[in-house]
Image: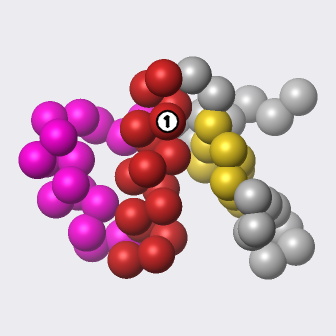
Amino acid sequence: MIDARVVDDGNLVTAGGVTSGIDLALWMITRECGASIAPHVESIMEYEQRGVVRRSSAE
């Protein structure tokens, strides 16, 4: 079992649960647009990203 809200295996990114889906969206923004953008989106959404993103070592 992987203890993470978001799992990024390169080609496949998945999350479990409703708020984990929001975390996944913020992770995709971080991954595709850069880490400096996600805090701005969090602020607009009034949501703090939480939990762990597990990345595959095969990247």
**Observer-nearest residue: 51 or 33?**
33
Q: Bounds of the magenta span?
A: 34-50
> Position of 53 compared to 57: left or right?
left
Across and down, in percent, residue 44 comes to 11, 47
Across and down, in percent, residue 52 comes to 58, 41
Would you identify the image quadrant in which residue 48 lies? top left
Disc 1 crowd rating (10 Å Cα; few below 14, some 14-19, many 20+) is some
Residue labelled with disc 1? 21
Residue 40 drawn above or below residue 42: below
Would you identify the image quadrant in which residue 50 lies? top left
Across and down, in percent, residue 6 comes to 62, 43
Q: Secondary structure at mark 1?
A: helix
Task: Give the residue displayed 37% in from the left and 77% down from the top.
Answer: 33
Q: Amino acid at mark 1?
A: Gly
Q: Residue 45 lies in magenta, yes or no?
A: yes
Q: Residue furthest top?
A: 17
> Position of 38 compared to 56: left or right?
left
Residue 58 drawn above or below residue 20: below
Across and down, in percent, residue 13 comes to 68, 54
Task: Give the residue displayed 61% in from the left and 48% down from the top.
Answer: 53
Task: Give the residue displayed 39% in from the left and 64% down from the top.
Answer: 29
> Position of 51 compared to 12: left or right?
left
